[in-house]
Image (cartoon, helix red, strand yellow):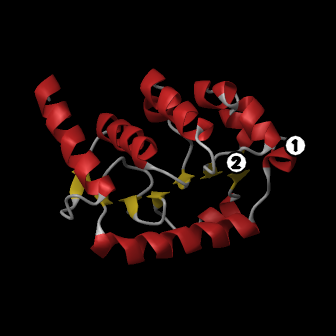
């Protein structure tokens, strides 16, 4: 894809996440996923929930994602909750973890490990923005996803948020997960 193609994609994602365009946007690569993550943090006003296999460095370690996460966390009343299916000890060497280690340790970022005994029961990953838009990967092994926002996305986004909260209530927190 050319730079203008990526900018067109970014515009489509921004419109979907903001709810200005209710059409689904497909995500088929790590670069697409990175753009979606960037636009999610740009648009979020309250809470972002992420269920991720591993916080893939190809997406989460980019300087633009890191900067947008910092900007989001600096806003009053925001929270970031992340569930990962890779033990915390294996992601601690990543740039994302190192950049936000203080926020993770202080609880500003709620990061927890989903043990395989739980993650084996589902095959998807997702990101929810303010319970009004989302990115959903039907197969967590691939960066292929759909991005939806707007009025018709609110109910599925709320359901994904409740699913996330349910999973989060069942898992080990970062202080314990480091010992695994």
User: Is 161 above or below relative to 52?
Assistant: below
Where's residue 85, x and y in %? 62, 52
Query: For the point 49% across and 60% down, which residue is it?
Result: 130
Depth order, front residue of 129/164: 129
Where's residue 37, x and y in %? 41, 42
Where's residue 172, x and y in %? 79, 57
User: Is 86 above or below relative to 61?
Assistant: below
Residue at numbered disc 1: 179
* Quadrant in which the N terminus appears: top left
Depth order, front residue of 92/122: 92
Query: Mark 2 or 1, which is nearer the eye?
Result: 2
Q: Is residue 133 left or right of residue 120?
A: left
Dot 1 falls on a residue whose secondary structure is loop
| Label 2 packing within 10 angstroms: few (<14), some (14-19), many (20+) | many
Q: Is residue 60 left or right of residue 84?
A: left
Residue 164 seen in the current view:
yes
User: Is 49 above or below relative to 34?
Assistant: below
Query: For the point 33% across and 70% down, which residue is it?
Result: 153
Query: For the point 63% across and 50% down, which residue is it?
Result: 79
Dot 2 falls on a residue whose secondary structure is strand
Query: For the point 62% across and 27% down, which residue is it?
Result: 94
Residue 121 seen in the current view:
no
| Label 1 packing within 10 angstroms: few (<14), some (14-19), many (20+) | few
Quadrant for residue 95, please give it. Answer: top right
* Label 2 – label 1 distance at C-alpha: 14 Å
Task: Answer with mark 2 or mark 1, whichever residue precedes in sequence.
Answer: 2
Q: Residue furthest front?
A: 76
Quadrant for residue 145, please give it. Answer: bottom left
Circles 2 and 1 in contact, beta carbons < 8 Å? no
Residue at numbered disc 2: 111
């Amino acid at each position: 894809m050319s730079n203008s193609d990526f900018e067109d994609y970014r515009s489509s994602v921004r419109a979907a996440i903001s709810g200005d365009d209710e059409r689904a946007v497909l995500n088929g690569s790590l670069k697409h996923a990175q753009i979606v993550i960037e636009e999610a943090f740009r648009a979020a006003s309250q809470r972002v929930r992420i269920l991720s296999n591993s916080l893939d460095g190809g997406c989460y370690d980019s300087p633009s994602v890191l900067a947008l996460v910092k900007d989001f966390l600096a806003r009053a009343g925001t929270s970031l909750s992340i569930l990962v299916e890779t033990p915390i000890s294996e992601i601690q060497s990543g740039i994302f973890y190192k950049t936000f280690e203080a926020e993770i340790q202080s609880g500003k970022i709620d990061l927890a490990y989903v043990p395989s005994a739980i993650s084996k029961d589902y095959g998807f990953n997702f990101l929810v923005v303010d319970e009004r838009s989302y990115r959903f990967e039907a197969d967590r092994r691939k960066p292929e996803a759909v991005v939806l926002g707007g009025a018709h996305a609110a109910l599925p986004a709320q359901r994904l948020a409740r699913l996330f909260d349910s999973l989060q209530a069942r898992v080990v927190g970062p202080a314990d997960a480091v010992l695994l």
